[in-house]
Amino acid sequence: MKSSETTMRIGELAERFDLAPHVLRHWESVGLLSPADRINGRRRYTHDHVVRVVTILRAKAAGMSLDQIREVLTRTGRAERQALLQRHHAELERRLAEIAASKALIEHLMECTADDFAQCPVYRRLTETA
């Protein structure tokens, strides 16, 4: 680590992302986050750690498990990593299509004036494509 590089303590990094410090320690223990350098026995995190935490959080938000995230982060070959990411991307696309179909049903129901929405012709047509 360069001496001119700004570092932060574990609590500062955790707070930046609204995480508990033990989460960062866990991610280190399972190989998601490289161990921080220690200064006077305390972990000191760099901007590289910030980038890694953002990557982990975005991957988790995309529905990836910690094992899947570690697999992506530890792949050394670009082709292997791309193949792995393409599978995750396809799953995201599938989930987005499901969400869009559900959203269309809900939006119709918010506007539907039928007493029994299950009998509404528009709703029934939407359920056929869902």
Image (cartoon, rainbow, N blue to C red):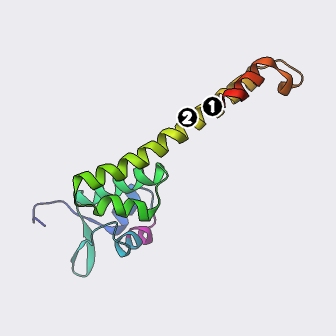
Q: Is residue 117 above or below residue 102?
A: above
Residue 8 on image: x %, y %: 27, 64
Query: The residue under label 1 is which amino acid type?
Result: Ala
Residue carrying label 2 = 97
* Residue 129 inside the magenta-drawn segment: no
Contact between marks 2 and 1 (CB within 8 A): the answer is yes
Q: CA distance from mark 2 to mark 1?
A: 6 Å
Q: Which mark is residue 51?
A: none
The residue carrying pointer 2 sits among few (fewer than 14), some (14 to 19) or many (20 or more) residues within 10 Å by Cα, namely: few
Res 32 → quadrant? bottom left
Residue 14 on image: x %, y %: 39, 62
Query: The residue under label 2 is which amino acid type?
Result: Ala
Q: Is residue 81 above or below residue 66?
A: above
Residue drawn at (72%, 29%) of the image: 127
Residue drawn at (31%, 60%) of the image: 73
Q: Quadrant of the N terminus?
A: bottom left
Q: Quadrant of the C terminus?
A: top right
Q: Which mark is residue 101?
A: 1
- Magenta stretch: helix, strand or loop mostly: helix
Looking at the image, residue 125 sits to the left or right of residue 59; the answer is right
SS assignment at label 2: helix
Residue 76 on image: x %, y %: 22, 61
The residue carrying pointer 1 sits among few (fewer than 14), some (14 to 19) or many (20 or more) residues within 10 Å by Cα, namely: some
Farthest residue toward the left? 3
Farthest residue toward the right? 115
Residue 109 on image: x %, y %: 75, 26
SS assignment at label 1: helix
Res 74 → quadrant? bottom left
Res 30 → quadrant? bottom left
Looking at the image, residue 5 sits to the left or right of residue 29; the answer is left
Q: Which residues are magenta?
A: 20-24
Q: Relative to the observer, which residue lies in front, 130 or 51?
A: 130
